[in-house]
Amino acid sequence: MIAIDGFVATGKGTIAKQLAKKYDLYHIDTGAFYRAIALKTILHPHDNIDKILDFINLKWEKGKIFLDGVDVSLKIREQEVTNQIDRICNLAKVREFVTLLTRNIAKGESVVVDGRDIGNNILPHADLKFLIIADKEVRIKRRVKQNEAKGIDTSYKIVSEDVEFRDKRDKLNMGNVPERIVIDNTYLTLEETIKEMSKYIDQIL
Ligand code: DC
């Protein structure tokens, strides 16, 4: 069981996917669950969060997320959905829902799970816990570039404020886990990051 927590634009999702492939692990992206719940609140604007969670049917199958039977893997990445996550992601009920769902999926599997609170909350007994960090300036530039590639017109200032806001929130959710292995990929390529993390994984697998 490998837990990967990381800040926005550190590439943790891609890193987790690559490690899953390399070590034949089952990858679970917990951010996708928050995104899918946010999407459901957009689709059902008049339902309160209790109703949303009572009736939601979330399935995670091999890197794809199904909301009430529909594959929403691409839809949940849209800006409209991202904007709504802030409203729901710190509600205790929502966090509890995602925690239980993730633990259920992870049960009995060899997993690599990425998110914010995996090492401290979702899988506190993980064999390895990583924390991916990178300089804020570099992450902002990465995000601006990613947005440009998607055709989203955002200024450095807007992205910078957004990253600032998310960092504060993510830090609180990550808690303090002394055994987390900190990987700083400010100056590392994806391949170099994988290589660095593999040194630790090779010791336990
Ligand atoms: O990893 P991501 O950017 O797709 O996650 C979407 C949002 O969900 C992110 O803004 C923070 C939240 N999140 C969280 O609070 N805890 C997690 N374990 C995963 C994601």
Image (cartoon, rainbow, N blue to C red):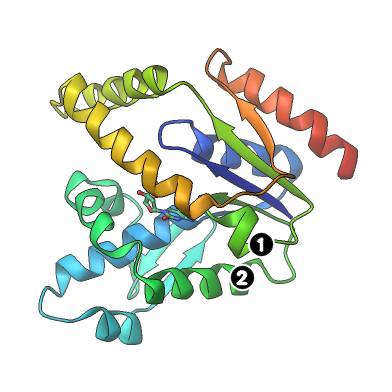
Please provide percent x and percent y for residue 123: 66, 62
Q: Is residue 201 left or right of residue 71?
A: right
Residue for badge 1: 123
Residue type at tag 2: Arg
Where does the image place residue 1, in percent across and percent down from the top left? Answer: 74, 55
User: Dot 2, crowdedness within 10 Å: few (<14), some or many (≥20)?
Assistant: few
Residue at 16%, 29% (x, y): give it: 152
In the orientation shown, which residue stands out farthest toward the top?
187
How many numbered circles does the render carry? Answer: 2
x, y percent for residue 46? 10, 79
Q: In the rendered image, which residue does mark 2 sit on?
A: 103
Q: Is residue 178 above or below residue 194?
A: below
* Residue 122 in view here: yes
Front label number (1 vs 2): 1
Give the left or right position of residue 14, taking residue 129 as reference. Answer: left
Q: Which mark is residue 84?
A: none
Residue 71 sits in quarter: bottom left
Q: Residue visible at 54% across and 57% down?
A: 62
Q: Residue at x 34, y 61 (%)?
A: 89
Return the x and y of residue 163 as percentages of the image width and height.
32, 34
What amino acid type is highlighted by mark number 1? Leu
Q: Nearer the viewer, residue 166 or 98?
A: 166
Q: Is mark 1 within 8 Å of ligand 1?
A: no
Q: Could you say which quadrant of the image residue 122 lies in?
A: bottom right
Residues under numbered marks 1 and 2 in contact, where contact means CB atoms less than 8 Å apart? yes
Residue 54 lies, with reference to residue 107, above or below; the image says: below
* Element on which disc 1 rests: loop
